[in-house]
Image: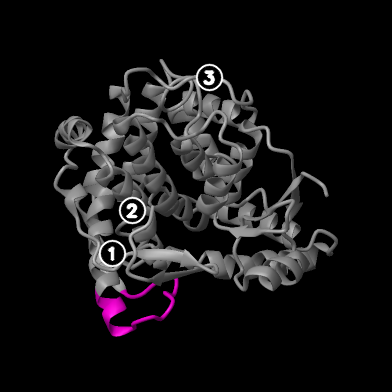
Amino acid sequence: MSETYKLYGTPTSYYTAKVRAYLRYKAIPFEEILTTEEVYRNVIVARTGVWMIPTLLTPDDLVVQDSTEIIDLLEARFPSATVHPAGAWQKLAALLMELYGDEWLIMTAIHYRWTKEENREFAISEFGSQARPGGSPAEQREAGLEKARVFGGWVGLFGIDENTGPAIEQAYEEFLGALNEHFKDFDFLFGSRPSIADFSFFGGLYAVLNRDPLSGRLMMRLAPRVVQWIERMLEPKPRKGEFVDDDRVPETLNPIFRAIFADQFPVLLDTVRNVNLWSRDNPGVPFPKTIGQHDFELRGRRGSRRVHPYSQWMLQRALAHYRSLNTVNRETVDTHLRDLGGLEQMQIEIEQPLNRTEFKLVADGTFRP
């Protein structure tokens, strides 16, 4: 039996980039298979029932769909040079950043890819050539437009419009500025070795915001050190480097944590409320991708977006670690959270815990990390 893993994804895929970089860092033998229309039908949907990538096929024929579950599985199988810091505060910080990279930064990526015409045209071309690699230019164009109708529709799902667009751009430029300053002194987010937070940020910052031409030029102009970090993430030194010592989180990351608690957490807390209500009305029913609408505010601009239950599942991972801390570690972590404006938010109670079963989200009453 071959020991090579098979990664099904595309160069344009936000979450495929996250997993691909992880596989390279851990030096796990893998083959990447382009997810054409045929592969989607005959492999992805046939094995999982959903049109989602990345999907990983293990040497023992286990199919895993979802970047977070893929990395969790591989961390268990390849524990050397773990991407999860061991310290109480450092690990929580990395999980919070993973939550931000996976579930909030994607709004920025969607905005720049689908509301900026130059990026949109590039994406249509890329999606078309990936979906039908042997097709004629006209066939590839049609395939790209079909993908654009699907993924471009996510603009509305994330509350992106003419009013919220400037706020998304302002918040993103602040984020880039903080990262650019941080990478003056550090190769990665927590030292000389990439963490789960690095891989999560890399998904959107590379696969969309760097590769797409207009946003790529913006990144180079505003944050050249972020571009250099992307280059390090593309060719990481396998299983090398260290996290900063004494459970420290560099203060240069503080602006990002303050944005996590000020911008993302109000949406997360309202997501939990909506999940509770939906679960009571639909007991035992697997969750759809979205379950309703709620308002949000960003940089003084208000918008309305769909409720994404998966975000609660990701939040639960950070909460599970936080709740596991002993008294001494909890006091130390609470001091950091208080300084960053996140202590109150982290006290949220999850009435309807979500778990992933058979590629679906279900509320089964069990709070599991």
- Residue designated by label 2: 315
Nearer mark to the viewer, of 1 and 2: 2
Residue 332 in picture, x, y percent from top left: 19, 29
Name the residue located 41 percent from the left edge and 81 percent from the top edge: 285
Q: CA distance from mark 1 to mark 3?
A: 37 Å
Compared to residue 139, the image places residue 212 above or below, namely above
Crowd band around label 1 with a 10 angstrom C-alpha radius: few (<14), some (14–19), many (20+): many
Q: Mark 2 is on which residue type?
A: Leu
Going from the N terminus, do you reach mark 1 or mark 3 first?
A: 3
Residue 82 is situated, as x and y percent measured from the top left of the image, at 51, 32
Q: Earlier in the sequence, mark 1 or mark 2?
A: 1
Segment colored magenta = 277-292
Q: Nearer the viewer, residue 110 or 310?
A: 310
Identify the residue shown where x is 58% and y is 21%. Answer: 240
User: Left or right: 210 with respect to 136?
Assistant: left
Question: Based on the displayed image, in which of its 4 quarters is residue 312 positioned?
Answer: bottom left
What is the x, y in percent for residue 93?
A: 33, 36
Q: Amino acid at mark 1?
A: Thr
Q: Please, which residue is most extreme toward the top here? A: 185
Label 2 crowding class (10 Å Cα cut-off): few <14, some 14-19, many 20+? many
Q: Residue furthest front?
A: 326
CA gap, disc 3 and disc 2? 28 Å
Task: Specify whether residue 212 is in view.
Answer: no
